[in-house]
Image (tube, rainbow, N blue to C red):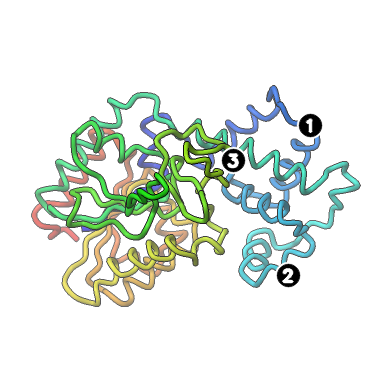
């Protein structure tokens, strides 16, 4: 069985969805007591990008553009970065805005870098659940329902937070995220896909994690999420940055170990066209083309793939993004974490997925 967790799987614990992140960050940005210069310019840059993105302007999309600006690529030359970026922005906005950032008193590179730092700090702080006991209670009930149907499973998530990790720690179960010790450097390094044989809860974090950092060219797990770029480890190694990636940053998706994780998801869904493959998707909107296309291709290759989509807007998501494979999807229009959602999930899973 495959479990796929989106933002809605963390919403019950006070962690915002990406749409909610935008609303909360905008309030925070206006009142920010900043240690950086040019705060007014940062606000102008943020507003400029939001206008450019239109309805698709969540924080992940904003960060993707900020990364491009930090690399000295202005928006009017965006197409030079490759077809993918140009296609992404043109399709979603229909036009490229022709404003000159310099005339608006915005330094694209300096302001993009400082604004990126603020947004990442904000996301990391907001990704901490308000109550760990609530996390345990909800996930414990969720997995108790799933276990009798599929006692082995793979978990995939696009979330940066540590909710699944918190649940496993409180339950006393080992979790495997593909992290292996590098004793010579005193680091815990992400080396590949989780080994199901070594853990009841193998977890692939497709977009990174708030406790992952880039050190010496590797992605490393750190005990604290409070590290910042430029900090040093006890072995005097420099932390080069956080390891959270965003849907339109394809340069990371096609690099190891993220490439391995995406390939692993595809492999599990495709199942080589074999026996019935079961997947429970919780709180995921399927707005990321890279992941959506994996699911669509998987159904074409493996018609036995059956999907339960648990989300309060499940039918709208299917109609908007998954119309091609709707016959393989059973929607549950409830919020994750509530008794109604769990009861409906239990009904759909009994007996042996015959309802789907």
Please rate how many residues cluster around mark 1, counting C-alpha atoms within 10 Å: few if below 14, some from 14 to 19, many from 20.
few
Most extreme residue toward the right, as rendered? 103
| In this view, 210 is above or below 190 | above
Q: Earlier in the sequence, mark 3 or mark 2?
A: 2
Residue 169, position in %: x, y?
25, 34
| Residue located at (21% from left, 40% from top) | 142
Q: Is residue 142 visible?
A: yes
Depth check, mark 3 against mark 2: the one in front is 3
Q: Earlier in the sequence, mark 3 or mark 1?
A: 1
Q: Identify the residue position indicated by label 1 in the image.
A: 37
Please rate how many residues cluster around mark 3, counting C-alpha atoms within 10 Å: few if below 14, some from 14 to 19, many from 20.
some
Q: CA distance from mark 3 to mark 1?
A: 18 Å
Q: Identify the residue position indicated by label 3 in the image.
A: 229
Residue 251, position in %: x, y?
56, 64
Please say if the residues under marks 2 and 1 sit with CB atoms less than 8 Å apart.
no
Depth check, mark 3 against mark 1: the one in front is 3
Q: CA distance from mark 2 to mark 1?
A: 30 Å
Q: Identify the residue position indicated by label 2 in the image.
A: 80
Q: Earlier in the sequence, mark 2 or mark 1?
A: 1
| Residue located at (34% from left, 38% from top) | 335
| Residue located at (32% from left, 52% from top) | 180
Q: Which mark is residue 206?
A: none
Q: CA distance from mark 3 to mark 2?
A: 28 Å
Residue 263, position in %: x, y?
37, 68
SS at mark 2? helix
SS at mark 3? loop
Please say if the residues under marks 3 and 2 sit with CB atoms less than 8 Å apart.
no
Please say if the residues under marks 3 and 1 sit with CB atoms less than 8 Å apart.
no
């Amino acid at each position: 069985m495959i479990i796929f967790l989106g933002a809605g799987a963390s919403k019950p614990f006070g962690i915002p969805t990406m749409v909610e992140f935008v609303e909360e960050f905008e309030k925070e940005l206006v009142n920010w007591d900043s240690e950086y210069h040019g705060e007014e310019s940062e606000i102008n840059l943020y507003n400029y990008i939001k206008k450019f993105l239109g309805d698709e302007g969540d924080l992940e999309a904003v960060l993707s553009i900020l990364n491009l600006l930090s690399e000295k690529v202005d928006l009017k030359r965006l197409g030079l970065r490759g077809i993918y970026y140009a296609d992404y922005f043109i399709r979603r906005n229909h036009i490229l805005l022709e404003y000159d950032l310099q005339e608006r008193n915005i330094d694209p590179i300096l302001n993009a870098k400082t604004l990126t730092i603020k947004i990442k700090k904000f996301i990391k702080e907001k990704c901490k659940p308000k109550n760990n006991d609530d996390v345990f209670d909800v996930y414990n009930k969720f997995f108790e329902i799933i276990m009798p149907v599929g006692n082995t499973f793979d978990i995939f998530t696009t979330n940066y937070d540590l909710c699944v990790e918190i649940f496993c720690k409180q339950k006393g179960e080992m979790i495997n995220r593909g992290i292996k010790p590098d004793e010579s450097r005193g680091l815990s390094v992400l080396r590949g896909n989780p080994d199901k044989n070594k853990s009841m809860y193998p977890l692939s974090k497709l977009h990174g994690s708030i406790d992952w950092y880039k050190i010496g060219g590797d992605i490393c797990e750190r005990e604290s999420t409070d590290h910042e770029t430029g900090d040093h480890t006890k072995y005097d190694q420099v932390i080069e940055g956080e390891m959270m990636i965003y849907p339109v940053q394809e340069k990371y998706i096609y690099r190891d170990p993220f490439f391995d994780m995406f390939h692993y998801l595809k492999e599990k869904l495709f199942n080589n066209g074999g026996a019935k493959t079961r997947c429970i998707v919780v709180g995921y909107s399927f707005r990321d083309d890279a992941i959506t296309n994996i699911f669509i291709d998987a159904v074409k290759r493996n018609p036995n793939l059956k999907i339960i989509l648990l989300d309060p807007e499940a039918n709208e998501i299917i109609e908007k993004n998954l119309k091609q494979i709707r016959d393989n999807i059973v929607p549950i229009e409830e919020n994750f974490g509530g008794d109604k959602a769990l009861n409906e999930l239990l009904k759909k899973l009994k007996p042996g997925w015959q309802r789907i």
